[in-house]
Amino acid sequence: MTRPFACLAALLLLAAPAAAQEKPPLRWGTDEEGGAPYIYRDKDQKRVGYEVDIVAALEKELGRQIVFKQYSFDSLIPGLDNDDFDFAMNGLEVTEARKAETRFTKPYYIYRQQMVARVDEQRFRSWAEFRADPALTVGTMDGTEAAERLTDALGQGRVRSFPSPLEAYADLKVGNVDAVVMDLPIAIAYARPDPDLKYVGLPFWKSTYAVAVRPDNGALADEFDAAFKRLLEKGTLQDIYQRWGLWNADQLDLLVIYGLVPARLLPTVPDEEADQYLGVREGWPLSSYLPLLLGGMVVTIQLAVASFALAVFLGLLVALGRLYGPPWLKALCLGYVEFFRGIPVLLLLFFLYFGILPLLEPVGVPWAIKSVGLSPAFVMATLGLGLNYAAYEAEIYRAGIGSIPVGQWEAAASLGMKNDVAFRRVILPQAMRTILPPMTGDFVALFKDTSIASMIAVYELNKEYQILAKSSLKFLEIGLITAVLYLVLSVPLGYLSRYLEAKWANEEK
């Protein structure tokens, strides 16, 4: 009896160290909205991308399961500090500002910036020629190293930032910017396959991607460094990069960084302009960014007024159709209200800008819009917000007009007024007293909803705040000023509404 128990005890003792040494899964913070070629979903809703392949290889090298955790790209570093995940890997550029907040591993990819222009562009043939022409504007992604370096090189007035490559290259194709400069992997994924676009000049400004971990987790950083070194030695990293079309001579520098090859053995890779980047810009006095916020405020006012005017006009027509139209028109107006109240404004804007506008290019609609000095993005935003808010305005007007007693119509008819005259002079003025308060509330809400238009490259107030805050890291200071500007727009409307209500109430007495 003692021998079986002894064997069992021995097995338990042998198993205990193995269980103790088993490490928990690593949580990988990344944003799959970042798109190709980093991490995105294919048609089967499977996560793909070269970083997905690298993480799969790291799992084997580290001997640990790695669990995906979706996280907004802008919040990756704060999320890491909050222990929401163990490491961040999402094309994170190693900048001085980020190094001050977190710890990076050794680089796993070396990239440069690539300029892209329309295929028929003849005004410049290199970054140096583009830089020398002050009339040219460039697009890039906001919050990136490219945005900071382009602003340093060209000044804020020549740089336009976008939330994603899709918007940037779309605006380039319709002529809203003259060129786009982004990380070479992005250009490979989005611009190279597009027949309407072309590379301009050589890549420039060499930088690196690395894995970010918490500053107090140096052991994990060392594990990653050792794993990346083994992946380089085996050729696994090169295989992944070649599979995604990302391998180039710059990646040979990784062999030097990891001590696998002396630097003197590597060839020199040409660079369009190898100037020194100084990191995050210092200073940022109020005078440097307040004019930009005020410019964004003007665009917000223009967009809100134009879209609300459209909403008032359409809303009144829909309300009258529901109240006095034939059955088929009532059904059609009801369908309009339910449809536009039931879909998100952002979805509508994307549908109009990325779906409908390209279909109108063959008949010259974008060109016609630009020929009168308007931006296609601004026009589509006005249309989208106007269509959406018209559905809400229609219900407000219907309720206000419907609240007027039938006797008012009869009294007007007894005075010899026709229906249209009675409506304009008797019914609508009385209904306005009921309509005005919720109508004013909608206008205030529209001022805030104009921020959604930044998703299709409309540079309104909120968009300017995002760009300036990400460039300067003054989120609190610039955010408070932006909030004050929004209040300057909305608070007077509330006072005006209350003044008119009080005035009309006194007139009734």
Image: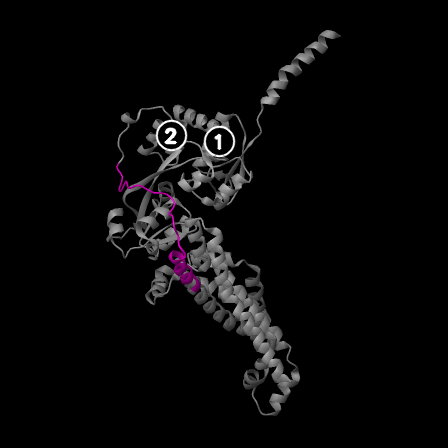
77 vs 60, nearest the viewer: 77
Quarter containing the C terminus: bottom right
Q: Tag 2 or tag 1, which sits nearer the N-term?
A: 1
Quarter occupied by residue 416: bottom right
The x, y position of residue 126, in whole percent, is 25, 47
Q: Under tag 1, what secondary structure? A: helix
What residue is shown with label 2?
238
The x, y position of residue 79, in whole percent, is 53, 41
355 vs 458, nearest the viewer: 458
Residues at marks 1 and 2, CA–CA distance in whole angstroms: 14 Å
Say which amino acid is labelled 1. Answer: Ala
- Answer with left or right where residue 270 lies relative to residue 363: left
Q: Is residue 306 visible?
A: yes
Q: Is residue 38 visible?
A: no
Magenta residue span: 270-297
The x, y position of residue 155, in whole percent, is 32, 53
What's the residue at 25%, 47% (across, down)?
Answer: 128
318 inside magenta stretch: no
The x, y position of residue 308, in whole percent, is 49, 69
What residue is shown with label 1?
56
What's the residue at 27%, 50% (across, down)?
Answer: 131
